[in-house]
């Protein structure tokens, strides 16, 4: 399940790409399929990094890669272990809502990004997230600590004040929004909720099979129900 639309990005051979907060490597593995790139996945969760390694190695065994290089690093977003102006693309998907000092985190993302290159940030969209918070007091703890909800204009204004310029905004995962509302309503930690489990099976089927009708419905509903807000920025030249 990809949140970032790579068709919007002109990824070329030789690119160095950072996926910060890579989790189990969904975006890292997807980027690795582009021709002759170097991708670095970074996260503070060692277990997730191990899952990311297994995912990428599976792609290697299946020949689903572009002949580039990959690496994984245990790293904290507020103190990235990389030189300044080194990456041609930085991806930060569903991370900032977890970080206490998101201002420092944003500055670090911009620091490691080359001038005139792209940063893509996704966070939970305001209204779907607000409804989740309202339906369940346990929701934020169940998702590793969502400590804030972003409004689109405020997020853009904050990052542009640090030297970026946004050039595209979109929404993703509309079909996941009712799932989370249902999960919050019945209890985010429950594993015996039949309706939730049935909906999860549907989402898993959609991810694996990618039926065209379901994909079309998801894209149609994204402007209204999209669970994620995705903003594409470009770093201004020095």
Image (spheres, helix red, strand yellow):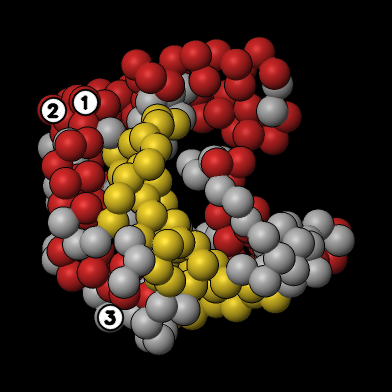
Q: Which residue is depicted at the point 73% across and 57% down?
A: 33
Residue 127, numbered label: 1
Q: Earlier in the sequence, mark 3 or mark 2?
A: 3
Whether residues under marks 1 and 2 lie with C-beta atoms below 8 angstroms apart, the answer is no
Q: In the rendered image, which quarter contains the C terminus?
A: bottom left
Q: CA distance from mark 1 to mark 2?
A: 10 Å
Q: Is residue 153 left or right of residue 75?
A: left
| Pointer 1 local density, CA inside 10 Å: few below 14, some 14–19, many at least 20 | some
Height in image: 46 above or below 13? Answer: below
Q: Residue at x 44, y 57 (%)?
A: 118
Q: Can you name the residue that lies furthest to the front here?
A: 238
Disc 2 marks which residue? 134
Residue 171 drawn above or below residue 148:
above
Q: Position of residue 189 (x, y in %)?
A: 31, 41
- Calculate the distance from the C-alpha at mark 3 to the C-alpha at mark 2: 33 Å
x and y, in percent, of residue 187 in the image: 27, 32
Q: Is residue 111 left or right of residue 133?
A: right
> Mark 1 vs mark 3: which is more N-terminal?
3
> Foreground mark, 1 or 2?
1
- Quadrant occupied by the N terminus: top right
Question: Image quarter for residue 32?
Answer: bottom right
Q: Secondary structure at mark 3?
A: loop
* Secondary structure found at label 1: helix
Judging by the rendered image, the residue that carries numbered circle 3 is 79
Answer with the quarter of the image where residue 171 lies: top left
């Amino acid at each position: 399940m990809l949140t970032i639309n790579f068709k919007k990005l002109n990824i070329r051979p030789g690119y160095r790409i950072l996926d910060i907060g890579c989790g189990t490597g969904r975006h890292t593995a997807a980027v690795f399929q582009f021709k002759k790139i170097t991708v670095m996945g970074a996260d503070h969760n060692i277990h997730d990094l191990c899952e990311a390694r297994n995912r990428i190695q599976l792609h290697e065994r299946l020949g689903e890669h572009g002949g580039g290089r990959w690496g994984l690093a245990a790293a904290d977003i507020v103190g990235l272990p990389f030189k300044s102006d080194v990456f041609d693309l930085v991806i930060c998907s569903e991370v900032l809502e977890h970080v206490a000092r998101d201002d420092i985190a944003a500055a670090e993302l911009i620091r490691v990004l080359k001038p005139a290159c792209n940063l893509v940030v996704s966070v939970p969209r305001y209204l779907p997230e607000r409804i989740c918070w309202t339906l369940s007091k346990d929701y934020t703890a169940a998702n590793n600590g969502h400590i804030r909800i972003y409004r689109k204009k405020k997020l853009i204004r904050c990052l542009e004040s640090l030297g970026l310029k946004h050039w595209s905004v979109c929404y993703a995962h509309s079909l996941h929004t009712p799932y989370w509302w249902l999960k919050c309503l019945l209890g985010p930690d429950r594993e015996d909720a039949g309706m939730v489990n049935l909906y999860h099976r549907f989402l898993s089927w959609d991810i694996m099979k990618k039926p065209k009708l379901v994909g079309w419905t998801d894209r149609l509903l994204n402007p209204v129900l999209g669970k994620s807000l995705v903003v594409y920025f470009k770093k201004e030249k020095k």
